[in-house]
Image: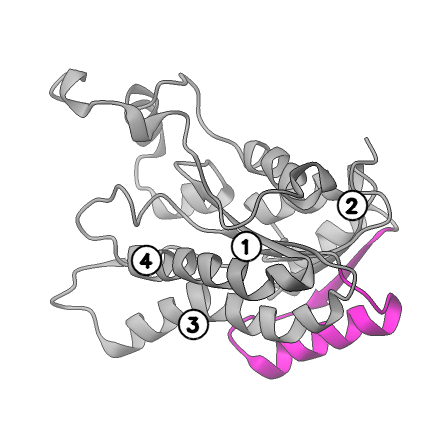
Amino acid sequence: MNRLKGKVAVVTGAGSGIGRAIAERFVAEGAQVFIAEIDPETGKQAAAELGSRVRFVRTDVTQRASVYEMAEAVRAEFGVLHVLVNNAGTNFFCDPLNADDATWQACIDLDMKGAWICVQALVPLMTEGGSILNIASTQPLRTLPGTFPYGAAKGGLLGMTAGWACDFGPLGIRVNAVLPGFIVTPLTYRTETNPEAVFERQIRAQTVKRLGTPEDVAWLAVYLASDESEFMSGAQIILDGGRNVMNAGVLPPDA
């Protein structure tokens, strides 16, 4: 408890799923948290349920004006920011030969460019140093057919993580990325036609024999946001229950 006491944090896309779990854990550890969420219903509900140290600011990370309005709300209330979690994003799965320009641009804007806009707006508030955490994905490292252009956008986010670690290190700002594997969120049930079959297949493909949860990501986020990780920057941490080291050849053919 109190590992983040005295810190002010912004978590984008924190109305549900991984972002919500991170916001909840940050509050439990003593932080003041801004939920920067595009959906007013989930954003307001999360803020109401997580308590008095949480504010909801409706934010579309793909729109520069919206992000700067959120940054102004942080500046007006606290004048400083210590932690930025670039979590907002969603899956875009399609065939590369049939995808159109609009789909490509929407994915890049949400899953990669939005993080850059947030950095531009919020790093000037990180005058006391701090931590930027980019929620990426294992898709750029170990992927499947039909995952274009999501893997490309998340791969770009990893590149920006490395670059920003160099750029902002002299300012006392650390930048790291978490690469979650298969994490069960409300989105999972909306995108999978047979979730239970997918869950069974995922567990068989991991060394840790349970499903990943948003809370798993949240605990790692606390460490990366806290002073405990003050010597870590530019890291890309895989959090996938050991799937990245599992040899698929040892699994039964129907795995």
Q: Residue shown at 73%/65% (left/top)?
A: 126
Q: Which of marks 2 and 4 is nearer the N terminus?
A: 2
* Residue hosting label 1: 87
Is any part of residue 169 visible from this angle? yes
Going from N to C along the chain, the mark reached first, 3 or 1, is 1
Cα separation, mark 3 vs mark 2, equals 30 Å
User: Which quadrant holds the N terminus?
Assistant: top right
- Mark 3 or 2: in front is 3
Is the C-beta separation of discs 3 and 2 under 8 Å?
Answer: no
Q: How far apart are marks 1 and 4 (CA)?
A: 14 Å
Q: In which quarter of the image is residue 117?
A: bottom right
In the displayed structure image, the side of residue 234 where residue 152 appears, left or right? left
Please state the horizontal and vertical placement of residue 73, each as a whole percent of the image: 79, 73
- Lower position in the chain sequence, tag 3 or tag 2: 2
Question: Which residue lies under the disc numbered 4?
Answer: 150
User: Along the horizontal axis of the image, is 119 left or right of 48?
Assistant: left
Q: Label 4 amino acid?
A: Tyr
* Relative image position of residue 138 (x, y in whole percent): 35, 43
How far apart in space, not on screen, are marks 3 and 4 (Cα)?
11 Å
Q: Name the residue under label 3.
A: 109
Q: What stretch is highlighted in magenta?
A: 53-81
